Amino acid sequence: MFYQAVKSDIVSHLSYIAASKGEALVIDPRRDCDIYLEIAQNLGVSIKDIFETHRNEDYVIGSIELSKLTGAKIHHGPASPGNMEK
């Protein structure tokens, strides 16, 4: 089992990557996704899942970009009632 926090230098943002048995997941990825690809390649794993733990208006999240690069599925909780898309 592998687990690592990834701290962004420009904004106050932490994301995480975890891996086991050839697969990895990323939690709240930053927009600059190269770090996750590099870590996954060094570990010899494939990123399969991306989790968004909360709404992220304070920075641009990289879930869509990382999903396009890896084919990983994006998971997120339901929107809060005051912020639901119409």
Image (cartoon, rainbow, N blue to C red):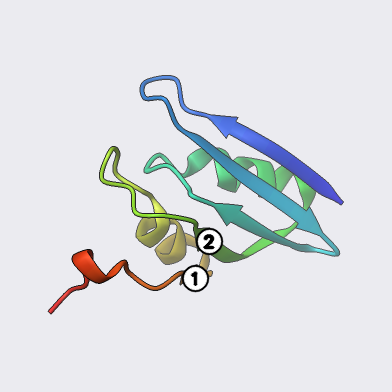
Under mark 1, the amino acid is: His
Query: How many neighbours does mark 1 have within 10 angstroms: few (below 14), some (14-19), or many (20 or more)?
Result: few
Q: Which mark is residue 39?
A: none
* Residue at figure coordinates x 53%, y 61% from the top left: 51
The reply to whether the C-beta atoms of the residues labelled 1 and 2 are less than 8 Å apart is yes
Give the mark count. 2
The secondary structure type at the circle numbered 1 is strand
The quadrant the C terminus occupies is bottom left
Q: Is residue 21 left or right of residue 77?
A: right
Residue type, mark 2 in image: Phe
Q: Is residue 19 left or right of residue 55?
A: right
Q: Left of 4 or right of it: where is 84?
A: left
Q: Residue at x 72, y 51 (%)?
A: 18
Q: Residue furthest bottom?
A: 86
Is residue 10 depicted above or below 61 in this figure?
above
Residue under label 1 = 75
Q: What residue does disc 2 label?
A: 51
**Front-most of 41 and 26?**
26
* Residue 35 on image: x %, y %: 55, 38
The residue depicted at 26 percent of the width and 45 percent of the height is 57
> Residue drawn at (53%, 69%), measured in percent from left and top?
72
Farthest residue, direction front? 81
Residue 36 is situated, as x and y percent measured from the top left of the image, at 57, 45
Label 2 environment density (alpha carbons within 10 Å; few <14, some 14–19, many ≥20) = some
Relative vertical location of residue 25 with respect to residue 35 in this rendering, above or below? below
**Residue 6: percent from left, percent from top:** 58, 33
| Label 1 or label 2, whichever comes before in sequence order | 2
Q: Helix, strand or loop at disc 2?
A: strand
Judged from this view, the residue extending furthest toward the top is 9
Q: CA distance from mark 1 to mark 2?
A: 5 Å
